[in-house]
Amino acid sequence: MSSGTYTGSVALGSGGRNFTPIEVNTDADPSGYLYGRVVVFTGTLMSMTRDVARQECARVGATPEQNTTKRTHVLVVGDINPGVLRPGSNVTGKARKAFDLQDGGQPIEVMTEDDFARCIQGKPITDFANVTDLFPVPGPGTGTPPKRDRLRSVPLAERPTPTPPKPPKPPKPLRREPISTDQVCSINTCTNGAAFKTYKNPTYCYAHIDVILARGGLEPLESFTHPKDWLLTRCRRCGNVAHYRFVYVQDNNAANVETCRACFWRGWGAEQRAAIGPYGDNEPVTYERAEATAEKYGHIYLGPLTNPSMAYDPHRVECSRCGRISAERLGDISFGCSCQPRL
């Protein structure tokens, strides 16, 4: 057996269990799935203790017993600790006894904890769900052993109603109200009033803001508000309309890089296809495929930016949540807009 961390299901110490005395509910619903049946548990139940499970059985008209016998109708299998199994065995003694009785013709139903949780809550077994959906608990991280519910010892009727998750916060607006300032433009020869207030970085007047945008190949289509706000612009080269931040344009100007993502990704896609040649994906991207991808990841599809639209080519999309328009490849669209909450 490989080494690892396991959640035990059978007590390693000596001593008996102190179960709460039970009395089967005679007023239980006779149509319940477990009504009138004898139920045995093996392994650790993650959503409740064995004692609570026995009480829930009695509540729905079932009789819980500790050992598998000829009276048993249902065996509920929880989490099994391989460290407590007999050498060469992969099942517990109760499960082995149940399988032997099945081979002898006794109809014993083997049930998972998920199924048992659905039964005691009056839900059909065919209603597939995880036990964490029925009894919400903080989910363990990937690769970690399962965790027991902190409310395992609390009867179901006494458990607090799970608090529904808070709805995600609305996205920040693309633009804010401009703040007036008595600062002047940071260009040495300019005495015009600044368009925005700043403490550390340079500030500019509206005329020099247009000059900086023009150097980046953009024409503003709306008034300037703040360097970190999204500004709707038109590319002077290809005519694509999209939102960019002024600080992003400044960074691209400093690196001598095209700001327009439509122009940039067109050139990049052509270079990729030329480098890969006939071994790459040379099939055109259909409008329907691009539209479906955009809608799947929270965008409104505004159309391709090349004709024909090939692999690696950009597409024009609008975020259905915040309204930002951008030029992106299909692979980038699948990451969603930056305004979307990360789960």
Image (tube, helix red, strand yellow):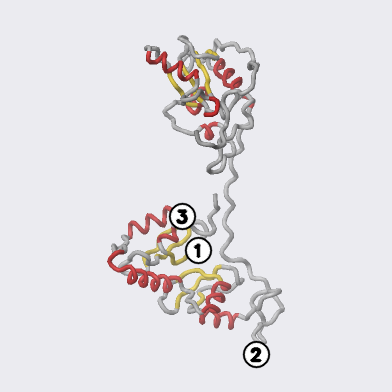
Q: Which mark is residue 298?
A: 3
- Disc 3 vs disc 2: Cβ atoms closer than 8 Å? no
Dot 2 amino acid type? Thr
| First reached walking from the N terminus: tag 1 or tag 2 | 2
Q: Nearer the viewer, residue 320 or 35?
A: 35
Helix, strand or loop under label 3 = loop
Q: Residue visible at 60% across and 32% down?
A: 149
Gap between marks 3 and 2 measured at Cα: 46 Å
- Disc 1 vs disc 3: Cβ atoms closer than 8 Å? no
In the rendered structure, the answer to whether residue 177 lies left or right of residue 112 reads: right
Give how far across and how far down residue 315 sits, in percent: 40, 65
Dot 3 amino acid type? Gly
| First reached walking from the N terminus: tag 1 or tag 3 | 3
Above/below status of 224 relative to 94 = below
Above/below status of 176 relative to 111 = below
Gap between marks 1 and 2 measured at Cα: 35 Å
In the rendered structure, the answer to whether residue 282 lies left or right of residue 228 reads: left
Gap between marks 1 and 3 measured at Cα: 11 Å
Tag 1 residue = 324
Q: Nearer the viewer, residue 47 or 301?
A: 47
Count residues near mark 1 (Cα–Cα under 10 Å), then give few for <14, some for 14-19, many for 20+. many
Give how far across and how far down residue 294 sits, in percent: 41, 57
Above/below status of 211 relative to 120 = below
Quarter location, residue 164: top right
Tag 2 residue = 189
Above/below status of 248 relative to 317 = below
